Image (tube, rainbow, N blue to C red):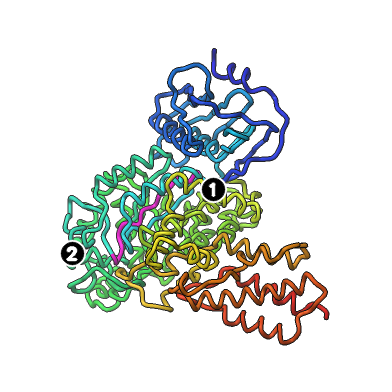
Amino acid sequence: MRLRTLLLCVLPFVAWGQDPPLMPRPRSVVSGTGHLMLVAPLRLVVEGPESERVRRGGVRWKARLADRMRSDLTDTGSAGGTFVYVRFSTIADMRDIRSDGSYTLEVGPGAISIMSATDLGVLHALATLYQALEPYGDGWGFPEMVVHDSPRFIWRGLLVDVCRHFMPREMILRQLDGMELVKMNVLHLHLTEDQGFRIESKEFPELHEQGSEGNYLSQSDIRIIVHEADLRGIRVVPEFDLPGHSASWFVSHPELASAPGPYAVETRFGVFGPTFDPTQEATYTFLDRFLGEMAALFPDPYMHIGGDENNGEQWKADQGIQAYMKTHGLKGPQALQAYFNQRLYVILRTHGKRMIGWDEIGEVPEDGSKVEPLPRDITIQSWRGRDGLVSAARNGHDVVLSNGYYIDLCKSAAEHYLNDPLPDDAPLDADQRTHVLGGEATMWAELVDERNVDGRIWPRTAAIAERLWSPGAVNDVDDMYQRLEKVSAQLDAIGLRHKSGQLEILRIIAGRDEVSALKDLVDVLTPVPGYKRHSLAVHTTSTPLTSIADAAVPDPMTARRVAELIDAIIGGASLSDVSSFRYLLGTAEMSSDDLPCCQDIARVRSALGQRAMEAIDALLTPTSMGPGDCAAFQKALDEAQGPFSECLFADLPAFQRLFEAACTRPR
């Protein structure tokens, strides 16, 4: 029997109900009122070409379902069980960034069907099914539904900086699992930086031997990462930052720099002077050999050259470079960098690669310099503002948005979620809009290491993944947060460490295994946003990342719940037993024995919570807060402004709203 005929037999029409809590939200979901119970064995019946992606994806999917159900789903060949009928036509070529990732998923009372053009669509459908699994009575199953789904953007990326703090292969591999679950498809590896040269070169082994302090990804590591990424429908784009951010190159090759050495791997963070010398042919001979080696290692059609934050100081200070610029009609550092980029463009094309770089590579000097703009087939990654995206698209360049997706800035998931690469009012015509490929979350690593990096990436990046996959009209923040909590638990279940890594740091801080009181406090704290931590304390590559700020996460769930509770009370919610919320509001007793590291923070939090309870009592009863009570509340608010150990109370604005409601109420 043909697969489609069988599907029509086992998937009769059903009545429709509420959508399951999926993330990203599919393009179209029609939900039924019933559900399909999952009964072992679980069988995938596949019609299509032999695909390692589908085979390995099915094994991975079954194992994860079995973990959640705590049940063996192995297909032993016996009769019965749950059938998943899979039909696809083509094995996607990951070198084609426009490979079709759409799929149709049908869950009926008798079986499940997946239909897609490529094996990428099969992986996306399996991810949707994993998220849809729910307990029903004594068992587990899937809601009846018909899903028609396809991505809004073709570039849905995550940048991982493995340089400023080294990130080993295992860290990168687990991010691939998270990316697969939320349907992201580009892993961008930032591999060279002032603080480290993090990839093995066989052509120039001295680069990683002298520029990495022994911490680098071997070529074997890269091949494993590339292969595992491909199995999950994820491309791997390497970045070699040029001509600036390059001190680690010059530890072994000072002759390529624009000023005499010696050079050392940088231990501080910021923008530094060491820069490649674009005026000598030896620079291009060297880069041709190196980039050719890397082109053979990374199969993706794109290679990222960085190109950002070159301060030009070494170029301005060198008389030889200045003379070269004058001879060639280059009137400033921007023009010299444009010339350098032209040379790199030719090198990359020779090795079959397309150039991608940060905003700066698309800039054309307006000073009359004799330099042409780069060809239109370069891709711009816009990091400085939306104007860069608009300008690139208008000039005919493909563009990827990262501005607004800098997850290292510790902003809320809501802020990232509402940052649309292509809103309805974008000042671009229909043709220009086709150049907006999507977006990329960026995890820069000044203040993260392998232990706490997952807590900076997840779960907020799932909100970015939805913005890049789902229709633009899917933008309900409250609904997003409800689903984000569920996907956070699912990410934890498949091996991400945003929860367990935090507990490890808390145990280090506390010096013992029992950290429940400390976690309660940290769960309402968030690291100061932006790059303000650098102004509060000195941070280097050797600074231990084991402080309260390293354990705290951006946009903590507990703080959001506190804010929701306070706003409900302000809005007139009737709460019969407010004392039951004292723990959530942070007024539980916090003894010095429980929190020896954070007594000042605990004291301030307790005082704030106590004043909040007084304000709530006033709002829920006919009594009013007098001038003395309001002054005491204001004092508690002032003391709670922080920062405390490079953290802030994430829910403090809600306490401010509570104060205003209680103290402006007519007496």
Check the image and report above or below for 531 versus 294.
below
Residue 579 occupies quadrant: bottom right
Q: Indicate which disc residue 649 carries.
A: none
Q: Residues within 10 Å of mark 2 (few under 14, many from 20)?
A: some
Q: Quadrant of the N terminus?
A: top right
Q: Secondary structure at mark 1?
A: helix
Residue 206 occupies quadrant: bottom left
Residue 410 appearing in the image: yes
Q: Residue placed at 46% from the left, 50% from the top?
A: 157
Residue identifier under label 2: 253
Q: Tell which of 332 and 248 is nearer to you.
A: 248
Please report contact status of discs 2 and 1: CB closer than 8 Å, yes or no.
Answer: no
User: Between tags 2 and 1, which lies in front?
Assistant: 1
188 is within the stretch colored magenta: yes
Amino acid carrying mark 1 in the image: Val
Question: Can you give x and y, in whole percent of width and height, for residue 159 in the image?
Answer: 41, 55
Q: Is residue 321 left or right of residue 76?
A: left
Q: Residues within 10 Å of mark 1 (few under 14, many from 20)?
A: many
**Comes first in the chain, label 2 or label 1:** 2
Amino acid carrying mark 2 in the image: His
Q: Tell which of 454 and 353 is nearer to you.
A: 454
Q: Secondary structure at mark 2?
A: loop
Q: Quadrant of the C terminus?
A: bottom right
Q: Residue placed at 74% from the left, 79% from the top?
A: 663
Question: Can you give x and y, in whole percent of width and height, for residue 204 in the image?
Answer: 17, 55
Check the image and report above or below for 40 versus 572.
above
Question: Can you give x and y, in whole percent of width and height, for residue 628 in the image?
Answer: 71, 87
The magenta segment is 183-195
Residue identifier under label 1: 487
